[in-house]
Image: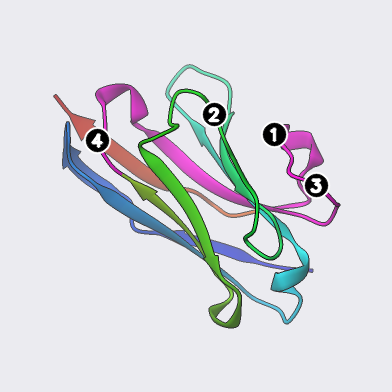
């Protein structure tokens, strides 16, 4: 089992940056693929980014490529999402998730554990 707690959300102007963090409990963090998802008001939750156990491979949704960067620090049991050049359409609740399977996953049903989410608001 792993428990996930996101932090770092807040209000930012369009064009600004935020860094989200997701702290995981447990000693098996390095065994999980970690993903970031988001849900905007009135929309389905959608994939944002994912990173493999070692951090050697990453995947991004096309809407955030070149602006967001996912990274992890296994000794600190933490995964990060650096978000630059934020747009109003990036506003959402952002969730981190852990996947105890091989390979990067873009579908939320493939993830086993979820955090409670952190709100990101982008003003235009």
In the rendered structure, the answer to whether residue 114 lies left or right of residue 78 reads right
CA–CA distance in space, label 2 to label 3: 16 Å
In the rendered structure, the answer to whether residue 117 lies left or right of residue 83 reads right
Q: Name the image quarter holding the N terminus.
A: bottom right
- In contact (CB < 8 Å): disc 4 and disc 3: no
Q: Which residue is mark 3?
A: 103
- In contact (CB < 8 Å): disc 2 and disc 4: no
Dot placed on the residue nearer the N-terminal end, 1 or 4: 4
Which secondary structure, mark 1?
loop
**Which residues lie in the magenta part?**
84-113
CA–CA distance in space, label 2 to label 1: 9 Å
Residue in the foreground of this view, choosing between 51 and 87: 51
Percent from the top left, x then y, of residue 55? 62, 61
The correct choice, above or below, for 35 with respect to 67 in the image is below
- In contact (CB < 8 Å): disc 1 and disc 4: no
Colour scheme used in the picture?
Answer: rainbow
Residue in the foreground of this view, choosing between 33 and 93: 33
CA–CA distance in space, label 3 to label 1: 10 Å
Residue in the foreground of this view, choosing between 84 and 7: 84
In the rendered structure, the answer to whether residue 40 lies left or right of residue 86 reads right
What residue is rendered at 24% in x and 35% in y? 85
Q: Residues within 10 Å of mark 4 (few under 14, many from 20)?
A: some
Q: Which residue is mark 2?
A: 61
Q: Which residue is mark 4?
A: 85
Percent from the top left, x then y, of residue 110? 80, 40
Q: Residue furthest right?
A: 101
Percent from the top left, x then y, of residue 118? 42, 49
């Amino acid at each position: 089992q792993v428990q996930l707690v996101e932090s770092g959300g807040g209000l930012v102007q369009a064009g600004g940056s935020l860094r989200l963090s997701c702290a995981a409990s447990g000693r098996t963090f390095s065994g999980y693929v970690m993903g970031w998802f988001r849900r905007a008001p009135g929309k389905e939750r959608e994939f944002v980014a994912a990173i493999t156990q070692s951090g050697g491979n990453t995947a991004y949704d096309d809407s955030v490529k070149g602006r967001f960067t996912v990274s992890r620090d296994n000794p600190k049991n933490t995964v990060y999402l650096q978000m630059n050049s934020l747009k109003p359409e990036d506003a959402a609740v952002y969730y981190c998730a852990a996947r105890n399977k091989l390979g990067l996953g873009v579908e939320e049903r493939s993830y086993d554990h979820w955090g409670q989410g952190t709100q990101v608001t982008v003003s235009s």
